[in-house]
Image (cartoon, rainbow, N blue to C red):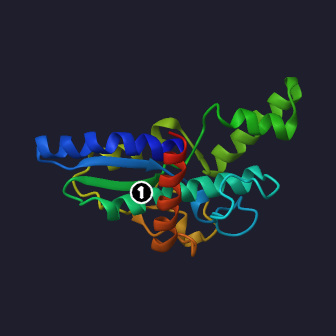
Protein backbone atom coordinates (compact mmCIF):
# COMPACT_ATOMS: atom_id res chain seq x y z
CA UNK A 1 0.00 0.00 0.00
CA UNK A 2 2.96 2.30 0.61
CA UNK A 3 3.95 1.91 -3.04
CA UNK A 4 0.45 2.92 -4.09
CA UNK A 5 0.47 6.02 -1.87
CA UNK A 6 3.92 7.07 -3.12
CA UNK A 7 2.77 6.71 -6.72
CA UNK A 8 -0.36 8.75 -6.00
CA UNK A 9 1.75 11.53 -4.55
CA UNK A 10 4.20 11.49 -7.46
CA UNK A 11 1.66 11.18 -10.29
CA UNK A 12 0.82 14.93 -10.50
CA UNK A 13 4.55 15.66 -10.79
CA UNK A 14 5.01 12.99 -13.45
CA UNK A 15 2.07 14.30 -15.47
CA UNK A 16 3.33 17.88 -15.20
CA UNK A 17 6.81 16.78 -16.25
CA UNK A 18 5.35 15.11 -19.33
CA UNK A 19 3.65 18.36 -20.30
CA UNK A 20 6.83 20.39 -19.87
CA UNK A 21 9.15 17.96 -21.66
CA UNK A 22 6.56 16.81 -24.21
CA UNK A 23 7.65 13.26 -23.40
CA UNK A 24 5.77 10.72 -21.30
CA UNK A 25 7.04 10.06 -17.80
CA UNK A 26 7.81 6.47 -16.78
CA UNK A 27 6.26 4.55 -13.90
CA UNK A 28 8.15 1.26 -13.53
CA UNK A 29 6.88 -1.11 -10.84
CA UNK A 30 9.02 -3.91 -9.44
CA UNK A 31 7.02 -7.12 -9.63
CA UNK A 32 8.33 -10.68 -9.86
CA UNK A 33 7.95 -14.09 -11.44
CA UNK A 34 6.07 -14.80 -8.21
CA UNK A 35 3.23 -12.64 -9.53
CA UNK A 36 2.45 -15.53 -11.83
CA UNK A 37 3.49 -19.05 -10.92
CA UNK A 38 7.10 -19.89 -10.17
CA UNK A 39 8.84 -23.15 -9.38
CA UNK A 40 8.62 -22.10 -5.72
CA UNK A 41 4.91 -21.30 -5.69
CA UNK A 42 3.09 -23.29 -3.02
CA UNK A 43 -0.55 -23.00 -4.03
CA UNK A 44 -0.65 -22.39 -7.77
CA UNK A 45 -0.72 -18.95 -9.39
CA UNK A 46 -0.54 -15.93 -7.09
CA UNK A 47 -3.83 -14.40 -6.03
CA UNK A 48 -5.12 -11.61 -3.81
CA UNK A 49 -7.97 -12.06 -1.33
CA UNK A 50 -9.70 -8.73 -1.76
CA UNK A 51 -11.84 -9.48 1.29
CA UNK A 52 -8.78 -9.88 3.51
CA UNK A 53 -5.95 -7.84 2.02
CA UNK A 54 -4.19 -7.33 5.35
CA UNK A 55 -4.36 -10.98 6.47
CA UNK A 56 -6.63 -10.25 9.42
CA UNK A 57 -8.88 -13.28 8.89
CA UNK A 58 -6.30 -15.87 7.78
CA UNK A 59 -3.17 -17.38 9.17
CA UNK A 60 -0.28 -15.46 7.67
CA UNK A 61 1.83 -17.31 5.11
CA UNK A 62 5.01 -15.51 4.03
CA UNK A 63 5.32 -17.26 0.68
CA UNK A 64 1.69 -16.73 -0.33
CA UNK A 65 1.79 -13.12 0.89
CA UNK A 66 4.91 -12.47 -1.18
CA UNK A 67 3.18 -13.72 -4.33
CA UNK A 68 0.12 -11.62 -3.53
CA UNK A 69 2.21 -8.49 -3.05
CA UNK A 70 4.00 -8.99 -6.37
CA UNK A 71 0.71 -9.61 -8.15
CA UNK A 72 -0.57 -6.39 -6.57
CA UNK A 73 2.41 -4.53 -8.03
CA UNK A 74 1.66 -5.97 -11.47
CA UNK A 75 -2.02 -5.00 -11.17
CA UNK A 76 -1.08 -1.51 -9.98
CA UNK A 77 0.88 -0.83 -13.16
CA UNK A 78 -1.84 -2.41 -15.28
CA UNK A 79 -4.58 -0.19 -13.88
CA UNK A 80 -2.34 2.88 -13.97
CA UNK A 81 -1.95 2.31 -17.71
CA UNK A 82 -5.72 2.56 -18.04
CA UNK A 83 -6.08 5.61 -15.80
CA UNK A 84 -3.51 7.76 -17.60
CA UNK A 85 -2.82 8.22 -21.33
CA UNK A 86 0.42 6.71 -22.60
CA UNK A 87 1.55 10.04 -24.06
CA UNK A 88 1.61 11.40 -20.49
CA UNK A 89 2.56 8.40 -18.36
CA UNK A 90 3.90 5.00 -19.38
CA UNK A 91 3.22 2.42 -16.65
CA UNK A 92 4.76 -1.03 -16.72
CA UNK A 93 5.86 -3.77 -14.33
CA UNK A 94 8.98 -5.88 -14.37
CA UNK A 95 10.58 -9.06 -13.12
CA UNK A 96 14.31 -8.29 -12.74
CA UNK A 97 15.29 -11.91 -12.31
CA UNK A 98 16.28 -13.71 -9.15
CA UNK A 99 19.08 -11.37 -8.19
CA UNK A 100 21.77 -12.40 -5.74
CA UNK A 101 21.64 -9.90 -2.89
CA UNK A 102 21.75 -9.70 0.87
CA UNK A 103 17.97 -9.91 1.00
CA UNK A 104 18.08 -13.70 0.91
CA UNK A 105 20.13 -13.77 4.12
CA UNK A 106 16.94 -13.67 6.17
CA UNK A 107 15.39 -16.57 4.26
CA UNK A 108 18.50 -18.71 4.56
CA UNK A 109 18.78 -17.95 8.29
CA UNK A 110 15.23 -19.14 8.75
CA UNK A 111 15.96 -22.30 6.75
CA UNK A 112 19.40 -23.18 8.14
CA UNK A 113 19.84 -21.16 11.31
CA UNK A 114 22.64 -18.77 12.21
CA UNK A 115 26.28 -19.45 12.86
CA UNK A 116 29.04 -20.89 10.70
CA UNK A 117 27.08 -23.96 9.59
CA UNK A 118 24.04 -21.93 8.58
CA UNK A 119 26.24 -19.47 6.68
CA UNK A 120 28.00 -22.33 4.88
CA UNK A 121 24.70 -23.91 3.82
CA UNK A 122 23.32 -20.56 2.66
CA UNK A 123 26.41 -19.85 0.57
CA UNK A 124 26.26 -23.37 -0.87
CA UNK A 125 22.63 -22.86 -1.90
CA UNK A 126 23.52 -19.58 -3.60
CA UNK A 127 26.33 -21.28 -5.49
CA UNK A 128 23.98 -24.03 -6.66
CA UNK A 129 21.37 -21.53 -7.83
CA UNK A 130 24.01 -19.49 -9.65
CA UNK A 131 25.40 -22.65 -11.26
CA UNK A 132 21.92 -23.68 -12.42
CA UNK A 133 21.38 -20.24 -13.91
CA UNK A 134 18.42 -19.46 -11.64
CA UNK A 135 20.16 -16.69 -9.70
CA UNK A 136 21.85 -13.78 -11.49
CA UNK A 137 24.17 -10.90 -10.66
CA UNK A 138 22.98 -7.43 -9.71
CA UNK A 139 24.29 -6.11 -13.03
CA UNK A 140 22.19 -8.59 -15.00
CA UNK A 141 19.27 -7.93 -12.68
CA UNK A 142 19.35 -4.21 -13.47
CA UNK A 143 18.98 -4.69 -17.22
CA UNK A 144 15.17 -4.99 -17.38
CA UNK A 145 14.69 -1.91 -15.22
CA UNK A 146 17.12 0.09 -17.35
CA UNK A 147 15.41 -1.11 -20.52
CA UNK A 148 12.02 0.08 -19.26
CA UNK A 149 13.40 3.42 -18.15
CA UNK A 150 15.49 4.17 -21.25
CA UNK A 151 13.99 2.42 -24.28
CA UNK A 152 11.75 4.49 -26.55
CA UNK A 153 9.39 1.63 -27.39
CA UNK A 154 8.06 0.62 -23.98
CA UNK A 155 4.36 -0.28 -24.04
CA UNK A 156 2.22 0.98 -21.21
CA UNK A 157 0.50 -1.74 -19.18
CA UNK A 158 2.93 -4.47 -20.22
CA UNK A 159 5.07 -6.83 -18.15
CA UNK A 160 8.80 -7.00 -18.88
CA UNK A 161 10.74 -9.95 -17.57
CA UNK A 162 14.32 -11.10 -17.29
CA UNK A 163 14.54 -14.90 -17.50
CA UNK A 164 13.06 -16.41 -14.37
CA UNK A 165 12.07 -19.48 -12.38
CA UNK A 166 8.62 -19.70 -13.95
CA UNK A 167 6.76 -22.97 -13.56
CA UNK A 168 6.05 -23.26 -17.27
CA UNK A 169 9.26 -23.94 -19.26
CA UNK A 170 8.12 -21.82 -22.20
CA UNK A 171 8.03 -18.75 -19.90
CA UNK A 172 11.50 -19.14 -18.41
CA UNK A 173 13.33 -17.08 -21.03
CA UNK A 174 11.22 -14.07 -20.06
CA UNK A 175 10.43 -11.36 -22.59
CA UNK A 176 10.45 -7.62 -23.19
CA UNK A 177 7.45 -7.68 -22.94
CA UNK A 178 5.85 -11.03 -22.10
CA UNK A 179 2.41 -12.17 -21.01
CA UNK A 180 2.12 -12.96 -17.31
CA UNK A 181 0.59 -16.42 -17.12
CA UNK A 182 -1.91 -15.99 -14.29
CA UNK A 183 -5.71 -16.25 -14.54
CA UNK A 184 -5.96 -13.94 -11.51
CA UNK A 185 -4.11 -11.09 -13.24
CA UNK A 186 -7.24 -9.56 -14.77
CA UNK A 187 -8.35 -6.05 -15.65
CA UNK A 188 -11.29 -6.50 -13.29
CA UNK A 189 -9.10 -7.38 -10.31
CA UNK A 190 -6.76 -4.51 -11.14
CA UNK A 191 -9.66 -2.05 -11.02
CA UNK A 192 -10.99 -3.53 -7.78
CA UNK A 193 -7.58 -3.40 -6.11
CA UNK A 194 -7.11 0.22 -7.18
CA UNK A 195 -10.47 1.20 -5.68
CA UNK A 196 -9.73 -0.59 -2.39
CA UNK A 197 -6.26 0.97 -2.24
CA UNK A 198 -7.69 4.46 -2.73
CA UNK A 199 -10.09 3.90 0.17
CA UNK A 200 -7.38 2.55 2.47
CA UNK A 201 -5.04 5.43 1.67
CA UNK A 202 -7.83 7.97 2.25
CA UNK A 203 -8.70 6.31 5.56
CA UNK A 204 -5.11 6.72 6.74
CA UNK A 205 -4.98 10.49 6.14
Looking at the image, which residue is at 33% across and 65% down? 82
Looking at the image, which residue is at 46% across and 67% down? 191
Image quarter for residue 160?
A: bottom left
100 versus 75 height, above or below = above
Q: Secondary structure at mark 1?
A: helix
Q: Residue lying at the far top in this picture: please name it.
A: 116
- 146 with respect to 37 (left or right): left
Number of marks in the rendered image: 1
- Look at mark 1 in the image and give the residue it sits on: 77
Image quarter for residue 71?
A: bottom right
Closer-to-camera residue (91/11): 11
Q: Is residue 164 visible?
A: no
Q: Is residue 105 visible?
A: yes
16 versus 185 height, above or below = above
64 versus 6 height, above or below = below
Image spot of residue 95 (x, y percent): 50, 53
Image spot of residue 103 (x, y percent): 65, 34
- 118 with respect to 91 (left or right): right
Mark 1 surroundings within 10 Å by alpha-carbon count, few (fewer than 14), some (14 through 19), many (20 or more): many
Closer-to-camera residue (123/42): 42
Image quarter for residue 72?
A: bottom right
Looking at the image, which residue is at 78% across and 58% down? 57
- 40 with respect to 14 (left or right): right
Image spot of residue 75 (x, y percent): 48, 61
Image spot of residue 79 (x, y percent): 40, 62
5 versus 119 height, above or below = below
Amino acid sequence: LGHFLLAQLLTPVMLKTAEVTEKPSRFVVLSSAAAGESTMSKNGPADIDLEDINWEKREYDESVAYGSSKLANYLHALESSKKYPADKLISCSIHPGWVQSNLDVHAFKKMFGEGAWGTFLGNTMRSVFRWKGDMISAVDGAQTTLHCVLDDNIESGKFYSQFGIYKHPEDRNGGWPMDLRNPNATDEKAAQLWEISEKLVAAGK
